[in-house]
Image (cartoon, helix red, strand yellow):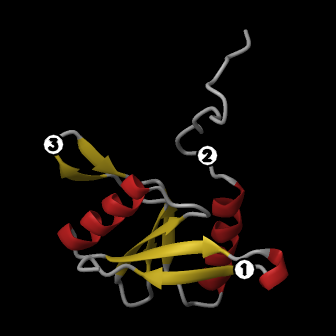
Amino acid sequence: MTRIFARGRTARRTPGTMNKSEARYADVLAALRLEGKVAAYWFEAFTFKLAPDTRYTPDFVVMLPDGTLEIHEVKGHMEDDAWVKLKVAASLFPFRAVLVRPKPQREGGGFETKVVNPED
């Protein structure tokens, strides 16, 4: 059976399955783990309740060697609702929130990171 979607829309992804950017970032985290800069990381393993009927599942929860936990959100393009959820999570929970954006190949590839300040 062929599913038809509105023009410009694609099928939602399956939870627990990484997209290409997330898979590349998981490789970066794995390399950092081997170097001892990351103690552990989990993909979509935690869900936070932000408000009644509002939940947020970060792409990665990362544990640093000192035991500090961070939430990392990998986004090539960020919609307003995702940005608000990330900022609310950063304000409610004692985790540093990090926005991770893939850099284009013409700019050398890799990723750029930005710590999310809930007050901004």
> Looking at the image, which residue is at 32% across and 61% down?
84
* 98 displayed left or right of 25: left
Per the image, the residue denoted by label 3 is 52
> Looking at the image, which residue is at 47% across and 55% down?
79
Choose mark 1 or mark 2, whichever is in front.
1
In the image, residue 8 lies at what x, y percent? 66, 36
In the foreground, 39 or 13: 13
In the foreground, 71 or 81: 81
- Outermost residue, left direction? 52
Q: Amino acid at mark 3?
A: Pro
Per the image, the residue denoted by label 2 is 17
* 93 displayed left or right of 109: left
- The mark found on residue 35 in the picture is none
**Disc nearer the start of the sequence (3/2):** 2
**Disc nearer the start of the sequence (1/2):** 2
Question: How far apart are labels 1 and 2 at the CA level?
Answer: 21 Å
How many residues crowd around disc 3 within 10 Å: few (fewer than 14), some, or many (20 or more)?
Answer: few
> Looking at the image, which residue is at 72% across and 57% down?
20
Question: How far apart are labels 3 and 1 at the CA level?
Answer: 37 Å
* 80 displayed left or right of 38: left
Per the image, the residue denoted by label 1 is 110
> Looking at the image, which residue is at 58% across and 61% down?
77
- If the image is split into quadrants, where does the N terminus sit? top right
**Disc nearer the start of the sequence (3/1):** 3
Question: How far apart are labels 3 and 2 at the CA level?
Answer: 26 Å
- Outermost residue, front direction? 7
